[in-house]
Amino acid sequence: MKRFVILIITLVCGANTFAQTRDIVVRRIEVEPSIGLGTGGISLALEVRNNLSPRWDIGPRAGMDFYGTTADVVSDYNFIRPNKNVMFFVGAGMGAGDVSEVGSVGSSDGPVETTTKFHFMPRAGVELFQHARLTATLHTYNFSQAYIMFSLGVAIGGGRK
């Protein structure tokens, strides 16, 4: 009976030891300027993210490309791998986009009109060395127009403390 009790105590203490995880503390705010290339031409964007936890971040994003300008709220889920220089993430953003369109249908020389449309952008990517971010994004306007964009950004701030 004594051996059984000692075995149970050892297993409980061992399980308790392995159940502990090291806290990964990240800096609170990061700013990411990025440049992208895709079927929408060249894009420039600036994003400010608040790291709510090591796994979740949220913040505003402003972008500009061939179609017009966008203002979004973005959020990402980060797949944390301790002691690794590669971190994958998935996320999405939604907001409004001012899109330039040719005014008259069937005429390529009509006046250019700017309309505001709902902008949605799911994305996935990888963060290298806690600062360089490669992202693939699908930009949609009112879920009717869509184009793919690949971007390279540099996160200033962020990373582990």
Image (cartoon, rainbow, N blue to C red):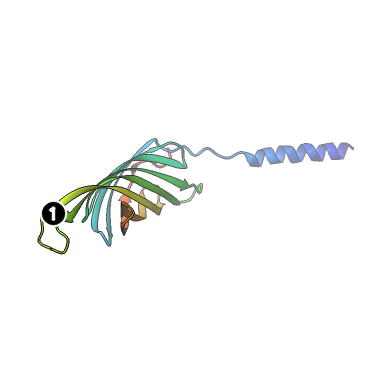
24 and 151: which is toward the camera: 151
Q: Is residue 161 left or right of residue 81?
A: left
Quadrant into which the C terminus falls = top left
How many neighbours does mark 1 have within 10 angstroms: few (below 14), some (14-19), or many (20 or more)?
Answer: few
Q: Residue furthest front?
A: 105
Residue 105 higher or lower than 9, as above or below = below
Locate residue 12, reporting x and y percent: 73, 38
Q: Amino acid at mark 1?
A: Val
Front residue of this view, candidates 63 and 141: 141
Task: Single out the residue that lies furthest toward the right.
Answer: 1
Task: Residue 99 in the image: state x and y as whole percent.
Answer: 22, 51
User: Quarter-wise, where is residue 102 in the image?
Assistant: bottom left
Quadrant the N terminus occupies: top right
Query: Between residues 132 and 103, which one lies in front from this camera angle?
Result: 103
> Residue at label 1?
112
Q: Position of residue 58 (x, y in %)?
A: 38, 40
Residue at 72% x, 37% y is: 13
Q: Residue at x 13, y 63 (%)?
A: 108
- Seen at 31% across and 48% down, the residue is 119
Q: Residue at x 85, y 40 (%)?
A: 4
Q: Secondary structure at mark 1?
A: strand
Q: Nearer the viewer, residue 5 or 133?
A: 133
